[in-house]
Image: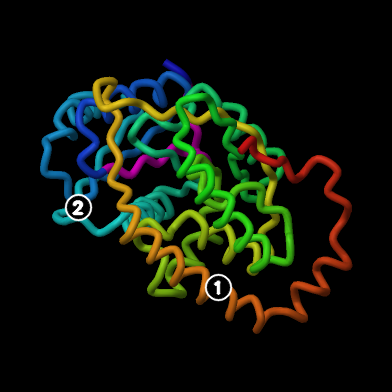
Amino acid sequence: MSRASATHLVLIPSYNTGVRLLQTVREARQAWNPVWVVVDGSTDGSEAGVLRLAAPGSGVRVMTLPDNRGKGAAILHGLREAHVAGFTHVLSMDADGQHPAGHIPAFMAASRAAPDAMILGVPMFGDDAPNLRRRGRWVSNWWANLETLWGGIGDSLFGFRVYPLSELRAVMEGTRWMRRFDFDPEAAVRLYWRGVRPVNLPAPVLYLRPEEGGVSHFDYLRDNARLTWMHSRLVIGGLRRLPLLLRRRRTAPARSAALLTPER
């Protein structure tokens, strides 16, 4: 069993992820200790297997919310608990098997080397990636770059990331947004506004078929409407911060390897 980190933890929000949740937690736990799960009002009993893993000294902790509040709200709950426990950084990853647990140590090492930065995963797509997802990602990335004046956010939607805990918690508690699917892009933009620099690392993304345990709660109409509203708000916020963004762009060091363009 690997020695538990006192500063960096893996945080996995989950809502009705089925049998895949247990496998994701096992894979994450093989790569890192500790691993925390926030069960966001699930009704499918998917947390049962993980609860059996969460024995004292296992490095696994399960927190259960009474109702579904959204990905961002689940992460905020975990951030507050992690702050109480003395952690300084969290790596967020999805429970549905899309994110590469084997890359956790490399992302944690990058965070330890640059503790003031957010370590953003840049997805490397395989043949299983839906074209509609790729096109939608390009649009969201373009808006996020506009909102930060191309400040170096390699991918705005990929949720495999390491955040400085205190910075992310302050951003989230300072706004009523960022509670559902809009969490990932808004977190990256608002943290950049706050002065948290992005460091981008490539990571593979896997789209599992339903027969492989793949689960998606993405609703194209509802969630794209939410993203459109979010980017409208962030564009206005970027305009208010335009002098700051221009000044930061002039004084920022050259990013020779900071921005990696994801395959589309």
**x and y percentages locating residue 97 in the rendered image:** 37, 29
Using the rendered image of the protein, determine whether residue 219 is visible from the camera's viewpoint: yes
Report the residue marked by disc 2.
Answer: 65
Give the mark nearer the N terminus: 2 vs 1: 2
Camera-side residue of 164 and 70: 70
Identify the element where label 2 is drawn. strand
**x and y percentages locating residue 128 in the rendered image:** 45, 26
User: Which residue is most to the bottom?
Assistant: 240
Quarter of the image with the C terminus in it: top right
Q: Amino acid at mark 2?
A: Leu
Q: Where on the picture, by quarter, is residue 237? A: bottom right
Q: Amino acid at mark 1?
A: Leu
Is residue 39 toward the left or the right of residue 78 in the image?
left
Compared to residue 129, the image places residue 138 above or below, namely below
Compared to residue 70, the image places residue 2 above or below, namely above
* Residue 9 lies in the magenta stretch: yes
Q: Where on the picture, by quarter, is residue 223? A: bottom left
- In the image, the segment drawn in magenta is 3-14
Cα distance in 3D space between marks 2 and 1: 29 Å
**x and y percentages locating residue 202 in the rendered image:** 64, 33
Compared to residue 211, the image places residue 181 above or below, namely below
Please tell me the numbered disc located at residue 234: 1
* Residue 161 lies in the magenta stretch: no
